[in-house]
Image: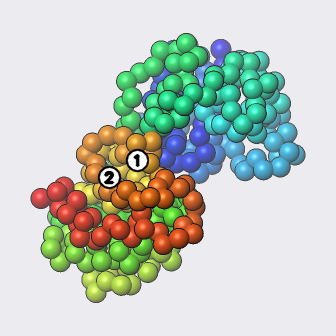
Amino acid sequence: MKIVVRTPNWIGDVILALPAIESLKKNFPQAEIWLAANDWVSDLFVSDGAPPNIIPLGRLNHLKILRTTAEKIKESRFDIGLLMTNSFASALLFYLAGIPQRWGYRRDGRGLLLSKGVLWKEPLVASHHVHYYLGLLESLGLQTVSPEIRLSLTAEETAQARKELAALDIDLEKPLVILNPGAAYGPAKRWPSARFAELAGMLQGRKNVEILITGSPEETALAESIAAALPARPKSLAGKTSLRRLLGVISQSSLFVTNDSGPMHMANALRVPVVAIFGPTDPKITGPFHQPSTVLKKDVPCWPCLYRSCPYDHRCMTHISPEEVFQACAAFLG
């Protein structure tokens, strides 16, 4: 039997879906399982240094690209396609690929494209995304594993991370605090950069820590604005790491301070202490799943809004002070 899983699109969602993917493997131990995944998340599926069976997906935003990709998938003759995405286009992809069994949530008007569709129930929508993905398998009559999320690194990856940090003149004898000020979703999820800079100054002055800033290539300027505001200028790796290299660097840190973002879940999956700053989104649904972690969120009248850019005064974020975040950090740093 051959099974292909259409994985979620974004880093955080992929990590939260890992228990469901592991559950699928345990239900079909003899099956050959493949993952249809976007290029930018494929590195998250590497286990013990071994690459998984991956069908790389680009942006399927045109029917011609969708058909071409479907033809490539069709060549592998899959028996089952499990959709962990919710879109009509993802179901159409598996339909065009001729996969006889197509399983997924019945959402976005795609019910007729599924051979086995699961009703989208409100309790699952309001639960943490880990349970949302596991709930799909349970509704399909499959057994699920305990919801444990872990990402691992090889000894070589860990050693390389330490070399990279040493090359940046970061003193590994001091606690390393990583600031992750970006969020791919949009500026509404970002605590103001000036607040991150103020927090960094507090951590440097009161806790004598090393500060490192991370982010995507699009967040390089954001990282630079924080670094430039500090007398003791921290190093930045924004736009300079792959996902595997970023995992290695995070694994060497004492604390990860972040907005609601994919790297937040990477740190949590490595069991690095996380201080997560939440604005328009609900930590009960997308927050860190494991301890050690602390979530800071303010109850404001307009929450939750799910806007990508706040049309008002961004009070859900601006009401969180640097001193408040510092105290949360201090609880982990001692």
Residue 30, above or below 157: above
Q: Is residue 237 visible?
A: no
Q: So how many labels did they put on this image?
A: 2
Give the residue drawn at x 79%, y 24%: 112
Give the residue drawn at x 44%, y 48%: 282
Q: Residue furthest bottom?
A: 231
Give the residue drawn at x 46%, y 55%: 303
Residue designated by label 1? 283
Which amino acid does the dot numbered 2 rest on? Answer: Val
Q: Position of residue 45 (x, y in %)?
A: 51, 39
Q: Position of residue 270 (x, y in %)?
A: 33, 45
**SS at mark 1 in the image:** helix
Residue 116, above or below 267: above
Side of 79 where 292 appears, left or right: left
Q: Position of residue 169 (x, y in %)?
A: 29, 73
- Picture quarter with the N terminus: top right
Q: CA distance from mark 1 to mark 2?
A: 7 Å
